[in-house]
Amino acid sequence: MSLLTENLTGLTVPFSPPYIDEDIIAEVVDTLRSGWITTGPKVQQLETLAKDFIGCKQAVCVNSWTSGATLVFKWLGIKPGDEIIIPAYTYAATALTVLHAGATPIMVDVLDDCTIDPEQVRKAITPRTKAIIAVDFGGWPCNYGQLLEVVSGDEAKAGFTGANTVQQGFGRPIVIADAAHSLGAIYNGVSAALASDITIFSLHAVKNITTAEGGLIALSLPEQFSNDEVYKWMKLNSLNGQTKDAFAKNNEGAWKYDIVADGLKINMTDVCAAIGLAQLRKYKDQLLPARRQVFDRYSSLLSGKEWAIMPSAQDDRRISSFHLYPLRIKNISEQQRDEIIKQMAENGVAANVHFIPLPMLTLFKDMGFSITDFPVAYRNYANEISLPLYPTLSFDHCVYIAELLEKVYLEVI
């Protein structure tokens, strides 16, 4: 029997509730009872666990993805006049961090899989280009092999001038992964975080692993850099350029400190780290497989529907982290898509859209960007619906959502 015909009055399916169980609550309570709630041992434990899970050389916890990108730009020495290439199809934070650094965002179009188009990146590189931010869409990694070929090509390297020792160490524009969605994604058999020059994760409340608010910078820099020294620099500059954090100062007789850099105040707290620590312990064996199971259920339920363009889960190089289920629907308008989402909400299912392309937002329109210059980004956006996806979503709920979607689609179309 179809679940739509059963008595499911009052059913509510939220879009992306955080995963909170007794182990997570216990870890937070342990932090509260310890008497130490700001940056301290829990943050250190989370960095170590993340480093081991990702396979990177160092991991730096901060209080958001945006803060992480700001810190990376500070390390790179990004300044006014510099250009950073970004996809037009991403969340606003990708561009806002560029603006905060005083640089100019250069938008390019995306591919059908919603990731940045390497050929458009190649065309956009100028002598002012210092970096490319590649956004892993919904957990699906970008084509990092092609992107690194582009920035390492003779044309890109010949026009590149390093303004400081960090930029000179790369000798080319660097590739930064906006991996807000892709903790646990795979590229060429290893963590996708190892495929770019620097990777920045989000640990926001709706992400696969959350610290309520937070971010994580994964470092696996080439041999001309010391990952340990860069880690120390980032920790120092994430806490006001202060030589001792509060935990170190709390030790008996250790109050004295110095300020040695014009640092930021973007450190993660232990009470936040505790949430992510308990989640990350379960991620590989429990939470990530559960996300894939929901993703695969949708794909099975929607297979054979001629109107459904299902998102990629895996190819010969990439495996998603299954953060989103970004379904696209053939031959519908933006207005029809919005009506489908509205009617699903009226039936208790919270769907979403990822993302409104940057050129459609007032800030960027006022800067002169036009969505007509990014036709693929607009096409992907106009017919995209993100279905609920989280580890505790039941099989029956997936069936109900798929049946409701088809019913509403047929009514709207």
Image (tube, grey):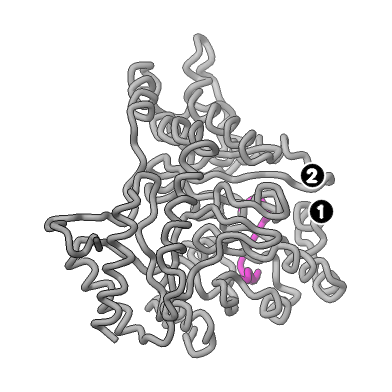
Q: Which mark is residue 225?
A: 2
Question: Residue 163, image x and y in percent?
Answer: 76, 61
Q: Quadrant of residue 92?
A: bottom left
The amino acid type found where label 1 is placed reads: Gly
Quarter of the image with the N terminus in it: bottom left
Question: Residue 59, image x and y in percent?
Answer: 62, 39
The amino acid type found where label 2 is placed reads: Phe
The image shows residue 370, relative to residue 353, as above or below, that is below
In the image as oriented, which residue stretches furthest toward the bottom?
372
Q: Which mark is residue 169?
A: 1
Residue appearing at x 40%, y 21% in the figure:
36
Using the image as rendered, state which of residue 231 and residue 307 is in the foreground: 307
Question: Residue 294, image x and y in percent?
Answer: 42, 53
Residue appearing at x 79%, y 44% in the figure:
225
Horizontal relation, residue 143 to residue 407: left or right: right
Quarter of the image with the C terminus in it: bottom left
* The stretch drawn in magenta includes residue 84: yes
Horizontal relation, residue 179 to residue 381: left or right: right
SS under mark 1: helix
The image shows residue 401, relative to residue 222, as above or below, that is below
- Tell me if I can see residue 402 in this picture: yes
| Badge 2 vs badge 1, beta-carbon distance below 8 Å | yes
Separation of residues labelled 2 and 1 (CA atoms): 8 Å
Q: Which residues are magenta?
A: 74-85
Using the image as rendered, state which of residue 149 and residue 353 is in the foreground: 353
* The stretch drawn in magenta includes residue 277: no
